[in-house]
Amino acid sequence: MVSFPTPLLWKSTLRFYGRHPWQMVLSILGIALGVAVVVAVDLANESARRAFDHSMQAVTGQASHQIIGGPAGLDEAVYVHLRREGLVRDSAPVISAYVQLGDRLLHLLGVDPFAEGQFRKLLDYTDDAEAGDAIRRLLIEPGAVVMSREMASELGLQVGAELSLHASGLAQPALLVGIFDPPPGKAAALQDLLLTDIASAQELLGMVGRLSYIDLRLSQHEPEDRLTDIKAMLPSNARLVSAESRGQAMGQMTRAFRINLTAMSLLALVVGMFLIYNTMSFSVLQRRGLIGNLRVLGVSRTSISGLVLGEGFLIGLIGTLLGLLLGMLLAQELVKLVTRTINDLYFVVQVTGVELSLTGILKAVALGVGATLLAVLVPAWEAGLAPPRMAMNRSRIELKASRLLLPLALAGLALIGLALVLLLPNRSLVLGFGSLFLLMLGFSLLTPAGVVLCSKLAVPLLGRLFGLPGRMAARGVRASLSRTGVAIAALSIAVSATVGVGVMVESFRTSVQHWLASTLQGDIYIAPPLAPGSGSDRRLDAALVAAIEQVPGIAEISRGRPMDVQSAEGITQLFALHMAQQSYAGMELLEGEKERVWAQFDQEQAVIISEPYAYHHRLQAGGLLRLVTDEGEQEFRIAGVYRDYGSDQGVVTMRMSLYRQYWKDDSIFSMGLYLEPGVDVPGMIKQLQALSAGKQVLRIRSNRTLREASIDTFDRTFAITNVLRLLAIGVAFVGILSALMALQLEKARELAILRATGFTPGQVWGLVTTQTGFMGLISGLLAIPLGVMLAALLIFVINRRAFGWSMDIILPGGVLIEALLLALIAALLAGLYPAWKMARVPPAAALREE
Amino acid sequence: MRRLLLILLVVGIGMAWWLFGRQAAVPVAPLDLGEVLGGVAEAGFERATAARTFHFPKDHGPHPSFRNEWWYFTGNLEDAGQRRFGFQLVFFRNALASGKAAGDSPWRSHQSWMAHFALTDAQDKEFHAFERFSRGAVGLAGAQSEPFSVWLDDWSVIEVDGRWQLQAGEGDLSISLSLLPQRSPVLQGESGLSQKSGDPGNASHYYSIPRLSAEGEIRLGARHHQVRGLAWLDREWSTSALGKDQAGWDWFSLQLSDGSDLMFYRLRKKDGTVDPYSAGSFIQKDGALTRLGPEMVELEVVRYWQSPKGGRYPVHWRLNIPSLQLELEVTPVMENQELDLYVRYWEGAVDVAGKRSGQPIQGRGYLELAGYAK
């Protein structure tokens, strides 16, 4: 039980913190930083998700279902048939693609204004006559588009402006015939929308005769047989899906990515908790005399505990509020990184800004205050235990602390055991992270024992190096274990996280590099500039392909065509590939025997699937996969599983000739050229550029450039991880600073006695610095095994469960040494001020204190 | 004249609505007819400046060189138990621009289409009205002469073995009729040239088939009614028509029991007077035609019906043509036959009773009241 402290008690608290302001400031800062990171990541995630939902919803409008087609889109005759048969009155054809205007990527939405009324409310005109004119021109003028007022003013365009849109690298003329105001609340979702008539969309995108999809609005009470009727009339390659499920599928794609970010942000908060614990228990210790006196005066245990809890609550609250503000600032930057990664890897989303929601605030407050209270529980309990007057003197506490060593270590081992149990075969990402945090917690409970061990071992060593101060430093760390233990644990947690993440990223990067080196066997790669999210409209100009094939000096060509197809597993990325002879060696097969795999792939109705695809859909070599082709649903044998880091959703690869047998699509998207020996790569690239000039804008890249570009994307993806890592270290730094200051200030009298007995200020400085350096070293040493374990967990469990990738763990010496240096430098930096202060205090003043 | 307003409203302002969606539709303010229809004829369109020679069945098909055109079917039906029904199915064509559309996409078309379908159930006093829009491309909407057909989505009138099969529906309500002309086409106005206002060229080509036998089925939810009766077809095409001072019209198409048919429209001016370009025709059973001018027809409103949506419609009339010794009372089969669609107007089935040359006479018909909605 805790009772509420009286005003008198609060006064004592105020007086105490008034005399030690830095203590409160550092606590608040620690909590604020932790909360800020969590808030920022949460905001960035939420903003990206919301922006996606909004644009999805604005574009989907009132549609309840959609009819989607094969990779090349949907035959428009399906729509006409639907209408003429009166199957669904509320239906609208849509063409959706991304086009480039200057350096901006815009969402080109082709609609039929006559069918739109029931679906989207995209436009808001103040002037009816103006609207009538714009829509009339949309309908009759080829290439006519309308855009939002915001976009028009950003681009400095006015009605009548001629635009050059790039779709698939081909420039197409367009004309701005109207400027609209998006309806209230939809401005952000529609700001990159270029609206056009379906006829212009077909012409601009080279999709004459085809649609992207058909929106339907079916009432919830629609009889089941109506759906059956609609399905019955669809051609074999078309599918009726609910609009909701389409949106969800897109949201699912980034789920793993977002969970990873959240877990990283929680790390910063956990480190912050150590900090709070440290500060609060120190403040209790410092007031042990006062607390003893209060108890003599009749203040109950519960009041004392309540006081400490109350303090913690206030500190937590202030820190949290500050953290909220800080988090919002931080989020402005983080959201850019998050958006860039999503755009790099998943789909186009435009995030205009971050806005804090009420639930976001509540979540942050609950986390910040909750974490603080949790951290304060032990000190509060300790404070209540203090007997009246009988001081909780230092030695007693340390005695108790050393008695606790064994139980703590056992508890730590138990937690680590539990972490391992959580790893028992399952596929839950959240359990994986749970295990990760348990492991860290267990390890931190083992830390005090580790500290004792290290300092015992270090006493003779430091003694030899630094003489008496060295020995004193090593012993001092052990003697004030209740302080140093926590500080070291906090720092080693933070450092181990950087080791874990560092090793994981490095291992990942190396694996990707190996994979790129073996997969990219060709000398030159050609593809149109990538517009993410536009499945069917990306292709190489057929005449240009024919011309390239005739260029002398090319020994062999591989051809690829990626597209999304329907399967029993949902939307599946299919890659139709004509492999050059040299390409085979580059594919690393993880399952299946080489000769048989390639024999099946080349001759039978078989595909190979990438590792993430196999993992997510629980498929194996030898299994069967059903895909919706233009000839209806077909079964394909899975010949093998191959390594691929190109897509975390997974890819199904099929030989080009088999693809063309089942899909009416002979376009290709990319070419890999294998040059004859002695042919000059840069010269060939120049020749190809000249060949394509004026026909299609292409990315023609050498093997090396493409590899570098891929690694750049990889590094961009992990940029945010590095930022979060640094932030966790920042929190740990504040923690160790606060712990050391507390420790050294507490020892003021002890040091004063040393001064009085002849220690020079320099020697005191040396003592303090050696001690902090020693603590840093211990943190670093303890962080390495934990870090490696974390890395293994991240690589073999988290990465696998989140993305389905496997990779080898690589222990780069650099990362390990960095960790040691990081801990050492952080500790030394944090010790600078206390050391300077201790050395400066005149001994008499320090001794007079009581 | 009559339906022109609807078309122009849709083109001028209504298009934006398709994008807005119904809920967000800007309420259409009471429109100034003169402003909306004060048509400057767009260059490139043909204009109705002189009488032409009609050719059937070719002229049942579309005339895309004119801006506007419509196929207007109305009719009175009853089932074996004398249960009364009225129906209206109309297809409007409007060209957004003259000439052929440029571009490769088959969706490219200058033709926009609108259709209205209304059903009157006189016994249950139920009135249903629906509308559709489409472009005249990829087969979604269009018209052709041989064999005759006009359609928008699944609403259509299609010639099959010499009969016109009419089909329309919405939800669990539908109509399916087989129509057979009982008369040859009647040319309205001056040999089919119907002058609407003073400016030469402000006219339409206009013919009617005042009598088509109709039989088929009406489906109202679970109920099916085998019905038969008489329908009326109005065909009109033009490029510009109304004068600036015209406010609306009252239009009658009546089929009388002695085999004669009457069409008359009264154009109202903004100042409340009757426009001298009001006109009509009286066709005897043997086909003899009498042209009617405004001075020949006496019209008197018996009763108004107040629309809950705003506006007051004169739904009950007395119509006298002294020169023909015709005295008729025109009574709606139900009062609320207002089409509450994007453009709001009243059009409904009516009963006719009176005398011709002193002899009692009955009939049925359709009445259209435009320009009253407020």
Image (tube, rainbow, N blue to C red):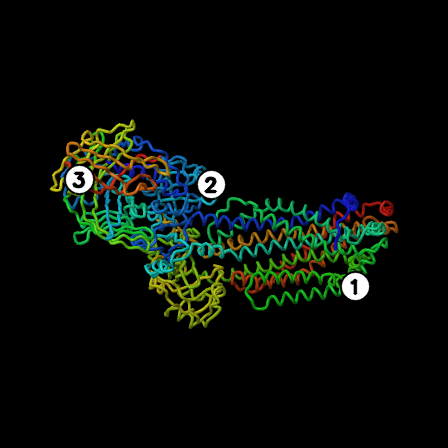
Q: Position of residue A454 (x, y in %)?
A: 75, 62
Toward the right, the furthest residue is A757
Mark 3 Cα shell of 10 Å, populated few (<14), some (14-19), many (≥20): few
Q: Nearer the viewer, mark 2 or mark 3?
A: 3
Marks 2 and 1, how far apart in space? 66 Å
Residue where numbered disc 1 is placed: A403
Asked if residue A244 lies left or right of residue A807, the reply is left
Q: Position of residue A539 (x, y in %)?
A: 37, 54
Residue where numbered disc 2 is placed: A184
Q: Nearer the viewer, mark 1 or mark 3?
A: 3
Chain under label 3? B
Q: Position of residue B145 (x, y in %)?
A: 19, 47
Chain under label 1? A
Q: Helix, strand or loop at disc 2?
A: loop
Q: What's the mark number on residue B360?
A: 3
Marks 1 and 3, how far apart in space? 121 Å
Q: Given the image, on which type of amino acid does mark 1 rest? A: Arg
Asked if residue A650 lies left or right of residue A792, the reply is left
Marks 2 and 3, how far apart in space? 63 Å
Asked if residue B365 lies left or right of residue A722, the reply is left
Q: Helix, strand or loop at disc 1?
A: helix
Mark 2 Cα shell of 10 Å, populated few (<14), some (14-19), many (≥20): few
